Image: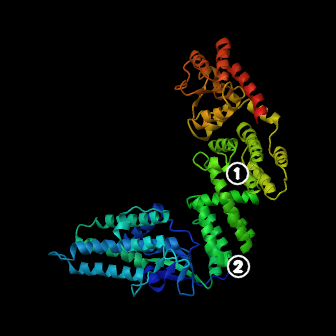
Amino acid sequence: MNVEIPLPSRFKIEDLFRENNFIVPVYQRNYAWGRSEVGDFWEDLKDLVNGKRRTHFFGQIVTYKSNSGVQEIIDGQQRLTTCTIFMAAVRDIANEIYQDNFRSPKAGVSLESGDLLRDIRLQVERSLYGEDKESVSMIVEPELDGDKNRQLQSYFLKLISGNQEVITGKAVTEPTKNMQTAYKKMYDGIKQMIRSKVTLGDRVDLLRKIFDAFFHRFYLVMISAPSREDAFTIFETLNSRGKDLEASDIIKNHLMSMMGNSIGQSSQDWEIITNYLNNDSRHITKFIRTYWASKEKVVPVAKLYRGVSNNIVDMDSAHEFLNDLKSLIELYTVLETPLKDENTSKFFLNKKITDRIEIFSRMGVVLYYPVVMAMHYRDYREADILKVINKLVAVFIRHRTIINDGTNKLETGFSEIARNIWNLNYLYVDDVINAINQKLLQSSEAAVAAFSVLSKEAAQKGAKKWTLVYLLSEFYKLHLEGLSEDDFHQSVFDDDNYRLRQISLTGDVHEYRNYIGNWVLLEKRLAKTDFSTLDDAVLKLSKSGLLSNRNLAQRIKQSGWGVEEIKKRQEAFGRDAMMIW
């Protein structure tokens, strides 16, 4: 990507806003700085005030000067919005001090301090509203098609004008919450700092010092490109290898640079997609990476932008990319949060699909997403999707849980299967199953050998717990009596009615205590504590509603329980495992 970058201009804050009017275009993300970023801003400013540094470089901004003379911000709106909010906080504190002490001057109050406060207020007002005080220097939400109902811009204007209802009231949207948080954090920081001074004069002098440090010794570099397209290219060139932006932010910029006159609608489509993910850039990056693994190949996050930008080269390919994301975002959220998403049951009519997704989610497995996304994109029937998901479960359990191989091969393999589905190289579900068996399914011999020594440590929650629960629940399902498969799933997973317990905890079984053969699933009413003795285990297992537990109680009562018994049960589980997975 070759572009001639214009000579940048260095601005102090005092000159930047006086010489330019800025607008955040519709395709840019909204204000997203939180406490951490605002905290960094404040700490950098305090270093200047306390004499630790002479100047502070606040970063770069990239703009395009529109025909109306307004600087359209391509990169840097977070910094500029923060600057305006900070200046408003300084002015409001100056106003408070002035009204409390100089409206009716008290004896001994220095008139010079009052002049300093008026000077601060005047400089801030000129920066925020220009010399004529009629045109705001920063617009965070442009007017679209004559629609003047701009809620974010209205909130922003009230905030920087010192409207107390906005400052203290409840912010509703994420951008307004972030703006309000930024204002309050900076306001509180300034107030706390000047309260360290005893006299009014010293407090006013410190407020002036804070403002001067920001106004005269903070500076930014602005690159104003001759066209919007050049500005997009400069933005990508400067940020594609940077750490400040997520890949999704740079990808969005690249997409919008291709959209021409449809940029407004495309920006709205992007917002629809990102709203599903709470406008979290890192989360959006994960989604795009999963989509890319479904259609193209697995790439590291660091190379995602390059892969996308090399393929998205014109308006048609940009629209196709955006439409693909729109068609898959609801499924992605279902795959990610089946336990929380109320739409999961509505998305898939077949409950068994939902159950499998739920199990994958509890075990912390995400590698299979591309395959399901590709099948959904190609309109596979739910019955076929269920067949493939069942096979994916078998692959994962053999490969990762039993044999304990790494995930790289699975991630790449699942992506290859997905890509062939996407590209219609597999015409039938049997083609998909055969490909998975040939390319990814570990042999029964290897799985049986690994299972013979399989052990799992106890865990009260999380993926470790649910992996062990899932393994045992599948073994128990082979011996259900009077309980349907769906009821068992509901009881074990949704209602969490069972607890993991080890039959023997004594030193006699040594390392075999964590073998699968030594574990049981027991109703939580019977499993409030670990088994204290083998007699305790027999008593509680015999009261279980599960036939396997009652049979196990009889075996322990007759033969006792030690290493050999654990091995025999483990061997039986191993044979069952090859039938199940």
User: At which x and y percent is residue 130?
Assistant: 42, 84
Name the kind of residue labelled 1 in the image: Tyr
Using the rendered view, name the quadrant where residue 94 is placed: bottom left
Residue 175 falls left or right of residue 163: right
State the image coordinates of residue 517 (x, y, percent, origin top left).
68, 26
Name the mark on residue 2. 2
Q: In 3D space, how far apart are the residues under numbered discs 1 and 2 (Cα atoms)? A: 36 Å
Q: For label 1, count other residues whose C-alpha is less than 10 Å away and answer few (under 14), some (14-19) or many (20+).
A: many
Mark whose residue sits in front, 1 or 2 = 1
> In x, y percent, where is residue 15?
45, 84
Judge left or right: residue 235 versus residue 529: right
Disc marking residue 57: none
Front residue of 277 and 574? 277
Q: x, y percentage for residue 33?
A: 49, 65
Looking at this view, is 27 or 268 the one in front? Answer: 268
Q: Is residue 35 left or right of residue 331?
A: left
Can you tell which mark lies on residue 369? 1
Q: Residue flagged by tag 2: what amino acid is it?
A: Asn
